Amino acid sequence: MFMAIENQSKFPPIVLILLGVLLWSTGGLFIKATTVDAFTVNFGRSLLAALTVAVFTYKKGLRLDKFTLLTSLLYAGTLTCFVYANKTTTAANAIFLQYTAPIYILILSPFVLKEKFRFADLITVFLCLGGMSLFFLEDSSAPNQLASDIFLGNIAALFSGLFFGLYFVLLRHPRSLENRNPALSVFYGNLLIVLFMLPLLIQNPPAPTLNDYFAVLFLGVFQIGIAYILFTKGIASGVRSLDASIIGFIEPLLNPVWVFLFIGEKPSNWAILGGVIIIAAVIIHTIINNRDKAKIARRAEAIEQ
C-alpha cells in the first residue's frame, strides 16, 4: 500500500485530488458507524493518522516551533469538534457547519494577512450566516434531550468551522511557508489529540468491537492520513488552487449522502437548504475571487511588457 502511494505519479494530479476528497467525504459515515464515544474515536483516528503522516513525510523534517504549535492546536480543535458533532448531531449538520470556515477566513484575512475586504466578501459572509441560522430551526420539533444533543452538536460543528478557518488563515501566513514539511501541523495536531484524549480513556476505558477497530483504522489511515497526502501531492504536481477548491466541495456534498445510503440518517429540510446556501455562496465566491486575481495578474503582465 505504501509503495503504491509513493508511485502515485502514474495518476494524473487531478485524480489524486479527487481521491483525497472522496476519502475525506467518508468521515461522517465511519464516525457514525462506531459504537464507542467521541473521545475514543478521536484518540484512535488521530493516533493512526499521526503515524501515517509521519511515515510519508518525516524525511522533510518534523521540527516543532511556536507557530507550528499554534496551527497544530487549531487543527486539533477542528478534528475534535468535528468528531463530537458527528456523534451528537446529523452528519449533514456537522459537515455543512464546518464549511462556514470561509466566514472567518474572509473576516480575519484583512487583519492577519493584510488582504483587502471587498463587497463580494461581505455578501458571502451574510449568505453563510443566513444558511448557518437555518440549522437551528430543526430543534424545536425534537424531544427535549435529543434537541439538546443536536444543539450542542451544532455548536461543536460551528467551532470546528471556526478552528478550521483560523487554521487556514495561518497556513497562508508567511511563517507557515517557511516549513519544508507542509504536513507538520497535521502530524502534531493529531499527536496533540492523542495526548489530550489519553487521560479520558484511562479514566473511562472503552470496550470497542471489531467493527469499531475497522472504522477507526480506516478513519486514521485513509480518511485523514492518505487523503491528506494525496491532496497535497496533487497540489504539488500542478493542480490549480481554484480546481482543487471546487473539487474539495465534493466532500460536504457526499458526506451526508454516504451516511444516508449506509446508515439511513436523513438530514432535515432546513439543514439541506442551509447547506445549499453555504456551499453555493462559497463556490461562487471562490470562482469570482480567482477570476479577479487572474485579471490583476494579466494587468501586471501587460504593464511589465
Image: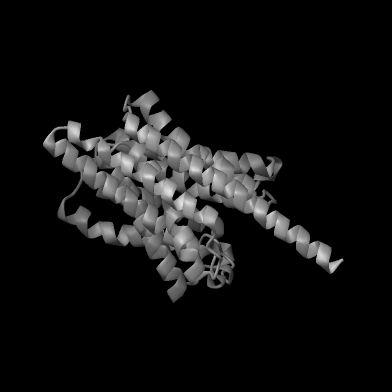
The reply, left or right, for residue 14 in relation to residue 71 is: right
Q: Is residue 194 above or below residue 16?
A: below
Q: Residue furthest bottom?
A: 66
Q: Give the residue at x 56% y 65%.
A: 116
The picture quadrant where one finds residue 269 is top left
- Residue 201 x, y percent position in the rendering: 21, 53
How many badges with numbers are in the image?
Answer: 0
Q: Does residue 18 sit above or below 57 in this rendering?
A: above
State the colouring used for the structure image: one colour
Q: Is residue 290 visible?
A: yes
Viewer-side residue, 70 vs 195: 70
Tell whether 92 sits left or right of 172.
Answer: left
Looking at the image, which residue is at 41% across and 30% down? 258
Q: Which x, y percent locates residue 32?
A: 31, 36
Q: Position of residue 215 (x, y in %)?
A: 36, 37
Give the position of the N terminus as an image quadrant: top right
Name, please, the residue furthest toward the left. Answer: 144
Q: Position of residue 38 (x, y in %)?
A: 26, 46
In the picture, which quadrant includes the C terminus? Answer: bottom right
Q: Is residue 107 above or below residue 130?
A: below
| Quadrant of the image occupied by residue 107 | bottom left
Q: Residue at x 68, y 40 (%)?
A: 11
Judge by depth and name the residue closer to the eye, 140 or 66.
140
- Residue 40 visible at all: no
The quarter of the picture where residue 257 lies is: top left
Find the residue positioned furthest to the front.
Answer: 119
Residue farthest along the right direction in this orientation: 305
Task: Name the foreground residue: 287 vs 68.
Answer: 287
- Asked if residue 112 lies left or right of residue 288, the reply is left
